[in-house]
């Protein structure tokens, strides 16, 4: 027998369990409701839980052989997993026409500026056997894409260094998976990667500097294919690394794959991935308008005095000094993007700051670790939220639509997972007119990349999205400059 400790936002319990049984069955027998739309067959990736010392695992394919501590997702995250099934498509698995090994696997990777997500799939069965995520270690050389491009400019081997950092991090996860499954590196036959345009350039060792300089023309935007032997990855030398197509310098494959995986429930909708860049698209039937705003790293916890990424220890929800939540149900260590938006909304609602954002003295969030919000933090949020909302307004004007024409606003990415839409509306980050039509859809980029791994027919969707998208360069837009100035104050808009 082993001991299983369950940690959730509502309770912590411990109980004995039979060694080697499937974790999903253990949890269900104890009354824990684990979401499994595929019936626990390892195809959907929605039964994710966190094991202390191991990380995220799929409970349907994890068989504990030692004492474990399991952290269950909070209700908000569980609801997002349901939304993924409701709004995101799941392709029928189609095995590759030719395979190179007896136990072949593929990996779908979404390389975010802040976080990297990896999905490991059995290429014989289509079963998803592991999901891993980690902070992008390139962050030591800058929290945003411009900082990393600048690092390449200012250091002779800056590009090579940043490339090797991400290659090493991916190889570490590949090696761990191979060890767990008792496989050789030749079993990894296909690696499919999405990410913003800069992240893909850094992965492939392509000079990203043109991305930061007018007229902002990257070395490539189309799909890139590299043989395993020259990829730098610990995969089958006859295998392949594929990076998915981008639209422009600042609207990358993460947006393309995210749009491609959304079910055609609505003909007119907004898609926003708020991170260090605010990448967004407005879909109007068969036309797509896209842009990217330089929101800065504030919504990823960067540039905030006590900020941190949305990882264990981050305050992700705040309704008052006695009413807050921390990712991982641990002691607060900092504030992530959703937490800082909640805090600003709280300060506004309690007249601690006014619409101009004036904060007379730092606001203490958690005194024991000196976690607080400063006047500079407020200014960083003002700049970031104005950039996002102003980008939305420019897309609407370009398409000739109004908020009343929009059926849904889909929030993608880690920030969208946790954000309280009421707080986002209160601060003026998101339009009030769409308040009841805002849906978090999780890591749509990662799910879209996984669909490409499941079936190459998915590539047709990606190509179509690229072909019908009109990119709007906001640095050339007088409308954006005007909107940016007008939307600096904290007020409900739209």
Image (tube, rainbow, N blue to C red):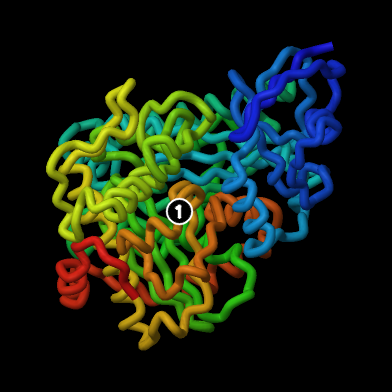
Residue 193, compared with residue 185, is above or below; it is below
User: Circle 1 sits in a helix, a strand or a loop, which is it?
Assistant: loop
Instruction: Specify the quadrant of the image occupied by residue 489.
Output: bottom left
Nearer to me, 375 or 254? 375
**x, y percentage for residue 143?**
29, 39
Mark 1 Cα-neighbour bin, 10 Å: few <14, some 14–19, many ≥20 = many
Q: Which image quarter holds the N terminus?
A: top right
Q: Which image quarter holds the C terminus?
A: bottom left
Could you tell whether 243 is left or right of 371 in the image? right
Could you tell whether 324 is left or right of 50 in the image? left
**Residue in the image at 42% along x and 33% along y:** 314
**x, y percentage for residue 291?**
34, 68
Nearer to me, 366 or 381? 366
Instruction: Specify the quadrant of the image occupied by residue 335.
Output: top left
**x, y percentage for residue 261?**
60, 63
Query: Is residue 93 visible to us here?
Result: yes
User: Please, which residue is most extreme toward the bottom here?
Assistant: 400
Find disc 1 in the rendering and name its residue: 420
**Residue in the image at 84% along x and 16% along y:** 19
**Residue in the image at 33% along x and 45% along y:** 343
Residue 70, compared with residue 106, is above or below; it is above
Query: Is residue 224 visible to us here?
Result: no
């Amino acid at each position: 027998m082993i001991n299983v400790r369950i940690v959730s936002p509502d309770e912590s319990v411990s109980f004995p369990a039979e060694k080697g049984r499937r974790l999903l069955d253990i949890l269900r027998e104890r009354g824990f409701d684990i979401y499994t739309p595929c019936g626990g067959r390892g195809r959907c990736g929605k039964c994710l839980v966190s094991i202390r010392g191991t990380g995220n695992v799929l409970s349907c394919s994890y068989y504990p052989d030692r004492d474990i501590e399991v952290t269950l997702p909070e209700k908000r995250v569980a609801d997002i997993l349901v939304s993924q099934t409701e709004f995101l498509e799941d392709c029928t698995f189609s095995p590759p026409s030719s395979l190179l090994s007896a136990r072949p696997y593929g990996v779908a990777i979404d390389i975010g500026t802040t976080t990297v997500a990896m999905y490991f799939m059995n290429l014989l069965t289509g079963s998803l056997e592991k999901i891993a995520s980690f902070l992008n270690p390139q962050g030591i050389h800058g929290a945003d894409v411009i900082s990393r491009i600048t690092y390449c400019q200012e250091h002779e081997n800056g590009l090579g260094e940043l490339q090797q950092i991400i290659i090493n991090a991916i190889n570490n996860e590949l090696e761990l998976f191979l060890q767990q499954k008792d496989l050789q590196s030749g079993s990894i036959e296909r690696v499919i990667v999405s990410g913003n345009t800069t992240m893909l350039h850094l992965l492939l060792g392509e000079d990203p500097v043109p991305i930061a300089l007018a007229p902002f023309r990257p070395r490539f935007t189309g799909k890139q294919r590299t043989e395993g032997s020259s990829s730098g990855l610990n995969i089958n030398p006859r295998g392949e690394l594929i990076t998915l197509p981008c639209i422009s310098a600042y609207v990358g494959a993460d947006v393309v794959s995210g749009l491609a995986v959304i079910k055609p429930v609505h003909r007119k909708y907004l898609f926003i991935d708020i991170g260090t860049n605010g990448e967004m698209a407005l879909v109007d039937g068969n036309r797509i308008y896209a842009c990217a705003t330089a929101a800065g790293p504030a919504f990823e916890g960067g540039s905030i005095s006590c900020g941190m990424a949305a990882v264990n220890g981050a305050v992700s929800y705040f309704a008052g000094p006695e009413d807050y939540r921390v990712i991982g149900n641990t002691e607060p260590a900092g504030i992530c993007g959703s937490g800082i938006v909640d805090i600003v909304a709280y300060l506004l609602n309690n007249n601690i700051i006014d619409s101009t954002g004036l904060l007379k003295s730092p606001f203490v969030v958690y005194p024991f670790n000196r976690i607080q919000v400063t006047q500079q933090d407020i200014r960083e949020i003002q700049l970031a939220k104005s950039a996002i909302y102003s980008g939305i307004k420019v897309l609407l004007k370009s398409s000739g639509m109004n908020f009343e024409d929009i059926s849904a606003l889909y929030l993608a990415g880690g920030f969208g997972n946790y954000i309280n839409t009421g707080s986002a509306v209160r601060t003026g980050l998101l339009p009030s007119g769409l308040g009841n039509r805002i849906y978090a859809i999780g890591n749509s980029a990662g799910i879209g990349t996984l669909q490409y791994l499941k079936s190459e027919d998915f590539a047709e969707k990606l190509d179509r999205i690229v072909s019908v998208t009109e990119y709007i360069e906001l640095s050339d837009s007088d409308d954006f400059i005007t909107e940016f100035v007008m939307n600096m104050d904290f007020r409900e808009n739209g």
